[in-house]
Image (cartoon, rainbow, N blue to C red):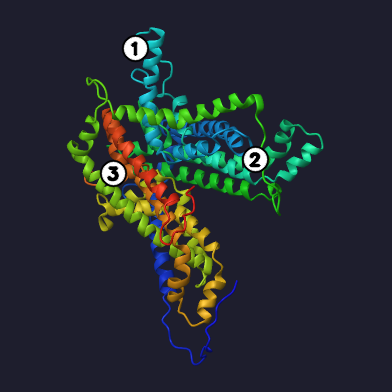
Amino acid sequence: MSVALPEREVAIGKPHFRFDLTRPAFYALAAVLAVLVVLPLAWLAYYALVDKDGQPTLANFAALVSDATLRKPYVLASGMALGVGLLSVVIATPLAWLVSRTDLPGRRAVRALVTASFVTPPFLGAIAWEILAAPNSGLINVFWRWAAGGQPYDAPLVNIYSFGGLVFAIACYTFPYVFTLVANGLDRVPADLEDASAILGGRAWTTLRKITFPLVLPAVLAGALIAILQALTMFGSPAILALPAGFHVITTKIWSLFQFPPKPGLAAAAALPLLLITVLLLQGKSWILGRKGYTVLGGKSGAPRISRLGPWMPVAALFAFAVLSLTVLLPYAALLKTALTKNGVEGLTLHNFHFVFFEFSATRLAMYNTFVLGFATATIGTGIALMAAYMVSRSPVRGAGALGLLATAPVAIPGIVLGVGLFLTYSHPSLMLYGTLWILLIAFLTIEMPAGYQQMQAAFHGIHPELEEASRILGASRMKTLRLITAPLLRTSVIATWCFVFIGTIRELSATILLTTANTKLVSVIIYDLNESGDMGAISVLGIMLLAVSFTVVFIANRLPLLGGQRLPALR
């Protein structure tokens, strides 16, 4: 690195007094993060441990243990989450190997389509599978009865309103977590070890079984834990598919405890074990990925070996096509077909689009609320994440590392648990925010903070502190250094973080469902409400709009040269 020095000498005299904003900014940031993270959890614990008169009690936890209607949702949720984790691994691991280590044609397209399923809100995917596989009206069952010559109410071929259907629908949108981790792991496996196995006589299957797979096993296990975690804390898909099937999982049970008559203390007690399980799963993931025994990659090695599929090519291509059809192509086609057709009208029609955008009064308010909150959350959240990442990475104040803990802590808080905590906190008469957009802004800032912080933290790691130190040595203040040196180097990461937070906000449902009122409805809640009334045409239009906005933002973040012509880092 070279630094251009000024031609004339820098006068070193008596230092001028400068008011450093670092310490006040640190305290302000710590206070903001404490309000976002600690306050709702404290109220959650308080409500779980007191009765309606404010007296300490363990009655809520006793009811949680003794009441079968509260125990059963936990059992079903655990079974569902384990099933989702197993199915995600079964789908994602071979697909990642085909994309990363074989000569499968169209590998870039497969990766792009897996990203599409990543962007799809899971509740929207569940609705798409309702359109495809509902027992009576599902397109697959209608087609099967037509092909088999059956009657309209004959036994269905597939039934999405079942435990197996729920596991399948959730796995369609959690397997990308496993796929991404395993594919990245396979990309990093050095060819040297596999070449050595081949030189020693190992066949392709032997090398895969004894060399390649053990090296990516931590990524597989970590991906499985993330898939389990996602399934366990998900609200939208279970609410859409499990409730019509007649059973609760824990997230829907917590939501039901807020229905009339509300039982906030019991809901708080039911949420705390879910929070504990989430923390344990995240700790398990960190333990698996941090094990040194698996760290065999290092130094410079050759490019990954590409295996030729040979006669297995058609089978591999069929598998990849089947996975993409079930997770992306069929659901998207079902949404598009439903949006463009109407019962009793021949051919294609724009009736549903006209109804949603010009006749349905709730749409405009929901779109306004959604995009205002998305813009505000992305802007404020990116700003907080930027400041926290700067404080932690440069440590200008003692104790700045605590900000990193506060900023990443919400990753362990399921959306429904956070929703309960925020409801209990901000429905109190002394701090009444329930019924306003402010409580949703607080919820979204908390939920999206870990993702935003981790992206900004990674960006700061890529900028050596000596650049800023050189500026300070030449007489620039800390703020001037940030403005002239650090900010230009971070601009692409800041924009990428903004886009990431924006997409996460407009698709959120788990916490939103507990915090919205008639005046603060969002598009995701409108979709959920319309699903209960069975208006699939309007749902499909709103879903397509959400997808179009999300993909447009991803396209902008990944393709357009902004603010100086440099391309943004790819969103993952």
Q: Earlier in the sequence, mark 3 or mark 2?
A: 2
Question: Relative to the observer, which residue lies in front, 229 or 523?
Answer: 523
Residue 361 found in image quarter: top left
Residue 464, horizontal then vertical, whole percent: 56, 68
Q: Are marks 3 and 1 in contact (CB under 8 Å)?
A: no
Mark 3 sits on what residue? 522
| Residue count near mark 2 (Cα–Cα under 10 Å), binned few <14, some 14–19, many ≥20 | some
320 to 32, vertically: above or below: above
Q: Horizontally, is 312 left or right of 496 in the view?
A: right
Where does the N terminus fall, quadrant-wise? bottom right
> Whole-percent x and y of residue 551?
39, 43
- Helix or strand or loop: what does disc 2 sit on? helix
Of all residues, the one furthest to the right in this rendering is 200
> Which of the marked residues, 1 or 2, is nearer the chain's N terminus?
1
Label 3 neighbour load within 10 Å: few <14, some 14-19, many 20+: many
Disc 1 marks which amino acid? Answer: Tyr
State how far apart marks 1 and 2 are (Cα): 46 Å
Residue that badge 1 annotates? 153
Of residues 319 and 398, the one drawn nearer to the viewer in this rendering: 319
Mark 3 → mark 1, Cα distance in angstroms: 36 Å
- Residue 162 at x, y = what percent? 43, 24
Q: Amino acid at mark 2?
A: Leu
Q: Residue furthest top?
A: 149
Q: Which residue is mark 2?
A: 217
